[in-house]
Structures are given as C-alpha cells and as structure tokens.
Image (spheres, coloured by chain):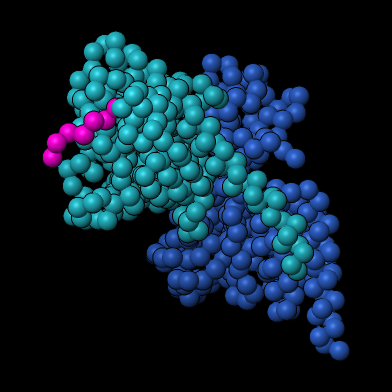
Chain colours: A blue, B cyan
Amino acid sequence: MRKIVMPGDLIAKNPRAAGYGTYVEKGKVYAKFLGLLDKTDTSVRVIPLKGRYIPSSGDVVIGIVREVTANGWIVDIYSPYQAFLPVLEYPENAMRNKKVNEVLDIGDAIIGKVLSIDPKMKVTLTMKDKVCKPVRVGRIVAINPARVPRVIGKKGSMIKMLKSELGIQIVVGQNGLIWINGDRRKVSIAEEAIYIIEEEAHTEGLTDRITEFIKKKKGELENAET
Amino acid sequence: MQKPKLIVDGKRLDGRGFEELRPIKIEAGVLKRADGSCYLEMGKNKIIAAVYGPREVHPRHLQDPSKAVIRYRYNMAPFSVEERKKPGPDRRSVEISKVSREALEPVIMKELFPRSGIDVFVEVLQADAGTRTACLNAASVALIDAGVAMRGMVTSVAVAKVEGNIVLDPMKEEDNYGEADVPIAFLIRNDRIESIALLQMDGRLTLEEMKKAMELAKKGAMQIYRLQREAIMKKYMKEETEEPEEENEQ
C-alpha cells in the first residue's frame, strides 16, 4: 500500500525527481497536498486523494451550458473556472442556419475538449473532436475528480471492462463527470460500480473486484428476467 | 466577583500541570457537502470548520487575476457562551477572522488558483478560552482534508501568565483572571517548526517570560500537530478498513 502524505512532508532530497503534487524549496522536495506517495528512483509524485478539477488543455470534459451569448456558450465544467465554448469551435455542419440557442441551450450537457487555458485561467473548449458531442440521452454520474484515473484504470483497463461486460457507452470526463448510455438496468449497474470505484479508489485489485461485482449483478438481472 | 485562586499546590484548577494541554479530540471530514471539514474539541471548546474551494468568487470584483482569494469567517454561536452572544459579526470576530486569515494566507499556495476563492468557515459551538487557536487548528485540518495545496500545516496554541506562572493552553478562568494571554500559531513542516504564523498578546510579559512562553508553545504545538495528522490519517485509514465489511453486506 502506498504511504499517505500531507502538505509539507519531506518526500525526496533530489529536486530533479520532483513531479506532480510536489514543490521544491532549498533543494528539497515536499508534498503539496494530501495524497498518496508514488516514489521511484528517478521520480517522486503525489497522487491527490481529494480536490477540485483544475483544467488542462487536451482534457475531455463533460459540462453543462449555463449561459448563451452571441458568440458562444458559457459552460460549467465543475471546476473553479467556467469554460467558454465559442460558436466557431462547434462543428459547422451542425450550425448552419441555426441560432446559437437552438444548437445548445441553458441546461444542455456537452462532451467537450479543453482547447486552451490562458494564464488568467480563461478556459476555452472545443467540440471539434470525434469524442465531442452534445449529450441528449443517457445518464451523467458525478464523482470526485481525483478518482477519475481509477475509473479509467491502467491503460483504460477498467473502462474497457465496464464497456465490454455491460455493452454500454461510457465517456469519462477528466472533471469527474461520467456519461453512461445504454440499457437502463445496465446503466444502473455501471453507476453503482462507478460509485464503488470512487469509494475504494486507493485499494489493490480493484478491477478484479469490480468485474466480479458486475458479473454478479448481471446474473441477478438474468435471473429476474426468467 | 472575587478573583478565585487559580493555582493550588503547583496544579491548575482542572488539575493540569503548567506545561499540559487540555484533552484534544479531532475528527476530519465530518461534513458531507463541504470540500473539507473538521470537528475539534480542545478542553471545553467545541469547534466545527468547513472549507469550500477553490471555487469561483462572488461577487466578481473580489477576484484576483494572479492568485486565489482566501476568506475566513470566525463566528461564535449565540449559545457558545453562558450569556447569550448576539449573533452576527462584531468587532472581536471580525478582527479574529482577519488575523486568522493572515496566518493561513502564506501557507496556502494561492498563486496556483488564480481568479478563484477558498472559503474557510469556523463556528464556535462552545467557547472556553483560546477559541481562535482551536479554530485555526480546525481550519488547518479542514484545508488539508479539502486537498488544498499548502506549504505545511498551521498549528496554534495559547500561552498565559497566571499568578506569575507561564502556563500552556489557558482555560476560561485563567484567561479571565490571568495577567497575560498570548495566542501563537506556527507553520509546521515535516515535523519541524518553520515559522510563526500568528502572535498576539493581551497583557504584558517580560522578555524572559516571553522566551519561556515561546518554548512552552512550541512543545504544545508539536503535540497538537501530531493529533492533527493523526485525525487526517484516521479518516483515510478508516475508508480502507471499512471495505471488507461493505463487501460482506452485498
């Protein structure tokens, strides 16, 4: 099990090894926030246990339109910063002859991608990517953004397993919102599974336990049908 | 009212020695909706702290384009003291909020979250001297629980002069009738006291007394620091030990 570190804990003496979640002062590396220590010979980083989503460019995020303006939409991406989606970043063929609020209106959910962030933390989104689309069906589940890597799993193992076992669509936003679509009962199983992953994120052998859980739930579902 | 005898046979009114803290209980993560929270008891003090953020700042004009703004609200519940306290901010609580905020500000890495705000709320449910120090301890645990980036931990303790003796962590009678009350907060990093984050003084101390007070405070702060760490550790350890039980239920 990985060690839990708190802000200010000395975690390395080699400033070149300092990675995510650390800060260097007088040649020593300290932890920046509460998290799990991941230390190897060449690098040291802190995996956060909690905290808000801080956008970074290239992230796939799920957001909700909060405001419609003449040249785009203001999107809530569940971070300290609201994002802006300009009309120009919306695929042209879906835009033709429509007013801005006819394409997306207040309360609509979207899957978008972070295009850029300026030093003032003005976040710009884009929809010009094949994963991006407005969300009209399915369900959105919100989890602690620090647990997102565990829902995806090592090289996507967890998410692949969920998709193939249940035969549903899942898109995980880096901001902790997850879109699930498919058979309603299976979506419910996936939702439950995601909450378990969130709850038990820092334990070993999680993928195996979740696989088991899903098989069990699927079995129950089939029994109920017959 | 006549001043009671505060020190009898080298012991204090509650039987403590001069260098002893009151019993402390800390629990992290007690509020579900807050990003970070903490419940703390320090003797008869009962404090609850909640941290929200980093989040958007409203009203907008308070935003700082280069760093996060920190807002700290110290508040005493009307029932926290014997005679009902009139609710709402008053001169005292506004001042305590200000100095406590200034104690935390250099510790929080504000520059990582431009244009955002971090809100710290501390409520005194029951007061028994040294509430500002207890509140700072609770706020510090709540901030760490919220996952806010910080340089270290803020730990705070008061020292008082009672009948000519320097004593650690005064309680109500000692605070009311003592000659001096000195709340001190330290920035502790990696088990070491790095700097002083807050120092106030009510009353007078000689230089010698001040040196002694500082020594006592440092010792006391280290004890509290360990308890603060323990409280956070416990929260995350608990999550792990609970899991097997949950699985059995299913």
As rendered, which of A137 and B26 lies closer to the eye? Answer: B26
Q: Residue furthest front?
A: B9
State yes or no: residue B3 in magenta. yes
Residue A49 place in picture, x, y as percent:
61, 45
Q: Is residue A162 left or right of residue A101?
A: right
As rendered, which of A40 and B241 lies closer to the eye? Answer: B241
As rendered, which of B37 and A144 lies closer to the eye? Answer: B37
- Residue A187, compared with residue B5, is above or below; it is below
Q: Is residue B62 left or right of residue B237?
A: left
State yes or no: residue B239 in magenta. no
- Residue A3, compared with residue B160, is above or below; it is below
Residue A108 place in picture, x, y as percent:
51, 71
The image quadrant where one finds the C terminus of chain B is: bottom right
- Residue A2, compared with residue B161, is above or below; it is below
Q: Is residue B59 visible?
A: no
The boundaries of the magenta stretch are B1-7
Residue B8 quadrant: top left
Q: Residue furthest left?
A: B1
Q: Residue at x 39, y 21 (%)?
A: B216
Q: Is residue A140 left or right of residue A73?
A: right
- Residue B224, compared with residue A16, is above or below; it is below
Residue A121 place in picture, x, y as percent:
45, 44
